[in-house]
């Protein structure tokens, strides 16, 4: 009889979900149930498909946060001891054009998932609800670094949706005794980052320039926003520690890196490591600008660090080098991409 622990990752096909699966496969003996929609792209989990086909600790299951019955089926199949709820409409800029979908997926989707978990009497899992640093939004400089008690001032429908996610998670912990812990992760990136996010878009454009596919011009949005950068591989290690080191129901934690710079400075670093660094120009593209921007994102992570002992280990320079190499490999393989 299989007695291994079972973990459910919603959104396993995303950057974070796929790296979390890799981490758990390497560092634990758990079985991994990855919930995704039937139409989810599988690029980030190509290396895991053979495990699924061989029923080797990885099991992909259908589930959609907007479909209650599919969630019931997924939970009944997985019966997890640990839930990492990462699935979301996660792109702030898209939330301006698709606010209803964003709110439904992120707020009501979280509610549906927690209700299904509450209704499954055979399990009592530790549940990680992934909120976002975007909930803090437009923070005045005198409130930096941002701690967990900082007030919310959302700057996008996405941020509003993550406030709802955050509060729904806390409510279920307090009202129903579910073992829910909430994270507000600050900017994290690395290989497999979607090209709708600034640093990944820049890296992809640079890789395409190096290959001669586009003119030597990187198109940008707002370069003045200040960010603290973390590596996705450090982030998933934090998430594992969150659910295994004395998780406290209803608590929320800021998690993030230690290296801060503007988006423009990040772009300058990416250009500096390019083989075409002397030829690349920068051009603002007004279509890449948000109507409103959370422009000061500097975290105080002392609460989480004190509770778990976690510290980021991967330096900014390695994260950016690995991100650029990720795009170089994809483009070298002959894949075609939208210019965005």
Image (spheres, helix red, strand yellow):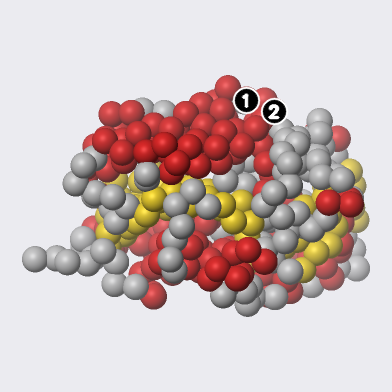
**Which label sits on residue 96?**
2
Task: Relative to 308, say whether 89 is above or below.
Answer: above
Tell me if residue 174 comes above or below residue 146 in the rendering: above
| The C terminus - image quarter | top right
Q: Position of residue 252 (x, y in %)?
A: 56, 52
- Judge by depth and name the residue closer to the eye, 329 or 270: 270
**Residue name at image x 31 percent, y 41 percent:** 117
Label 1 neighbourhood size at 10 Å, few (<14), some (14-19), many (20+)?
Answer: some
Report how far apart the C-alphas of labels 2 and 1 lie in the structure: 6 Å
Residue 167, percent across and down? 55, 37
**Residue 230 found in image quarter:** bottom right
| Residue at the image point whose x is 75% and y is 36% from the top | 153
What count of labels does the image hold? 2
| Towards the viewer: 81 or 62 | 81
Side of 146 relative to 232 (left or right):
right
Q: Are marks 2 and 1 in contact (CB under 8 Å)?
A: yes
Q: Quadrant of residue 274?
A: bottom right
**Location of mark 1 (residue):** 99
Residue drawn at x 73%, y 58% is 299
Residue 139 picture location, percent across and down:
82, 45
Frontmost residue, 244 versus 312:
244
Label at residue 314: none
Above or below: residue 230 compared with residue 296: below
């Amino acid at each position: 009889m299989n007695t291994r622990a079972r973990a459910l990752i919603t959104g396993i096909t995303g950057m974070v979900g796929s790296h979390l699966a890799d981490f758990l496969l390497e560092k634990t003996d758990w079985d991994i149930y990855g919930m995704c929609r039937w139409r989810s792209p599988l690029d980030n989990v190509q290396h895991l498909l053979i495990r699924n086909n061989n029923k080797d600790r990885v099991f992909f299951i259908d589930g959609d946060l907007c479909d209650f019955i599919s969630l019931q089926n997924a939970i009944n199949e997985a019966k997890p001891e640990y839930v990492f709820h990462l699935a979301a409409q996660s792109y702030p800029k898209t939330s301006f054009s698709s606010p209803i979908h964003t709110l439904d997926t992120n707020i009501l989707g979280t509610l549906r998932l927690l209700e299904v978990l509450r209704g499954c009497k055979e399990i009592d899992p530790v549940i990680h609800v992934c909120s976002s640093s975007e909930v803090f939004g437009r923070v005045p400089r005198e409130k930096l670094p941002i701690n967990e008690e900082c007030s919310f001032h959302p700057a996008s429908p996405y941020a509003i949706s993550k406030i709802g996610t955050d509060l729904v998670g806390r409510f279920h912990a307090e009202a129903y005794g579910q073992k829910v812990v909430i994270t507000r992760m600050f900017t994290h990136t690395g290989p497999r980052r979607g090209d709708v996010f600034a640093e990944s878009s820049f890296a992809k454009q640079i890789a395409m320039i190096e290959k001669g596919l586009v003119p030597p011009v990187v198109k940008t949005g707002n370069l003045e926003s200040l960010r603290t950068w973390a590596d996705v591989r450090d982030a998933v290690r934090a998430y594992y520690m969150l659910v295994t080191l004395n998780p406290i129901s209803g608590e929320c934690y800021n998690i993030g890196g230690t290296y801060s710079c503007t988006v423009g400075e990040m772009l300058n670093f990416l250009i500096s490591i390019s083989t075409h660094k002397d030829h690349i120009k920068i051009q603002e593209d007004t279509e890449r600008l948000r109507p409103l921007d959370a422009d000061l994102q500097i975290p105080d992570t002392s609460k989480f660090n004190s509770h778990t002992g976690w510290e980021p280990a991967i330096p900014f320079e390695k994260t950016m080098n690995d991100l650029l190499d990720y795009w170089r490999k994809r483009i070298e393989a002959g894949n075609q991409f939208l210019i965005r």
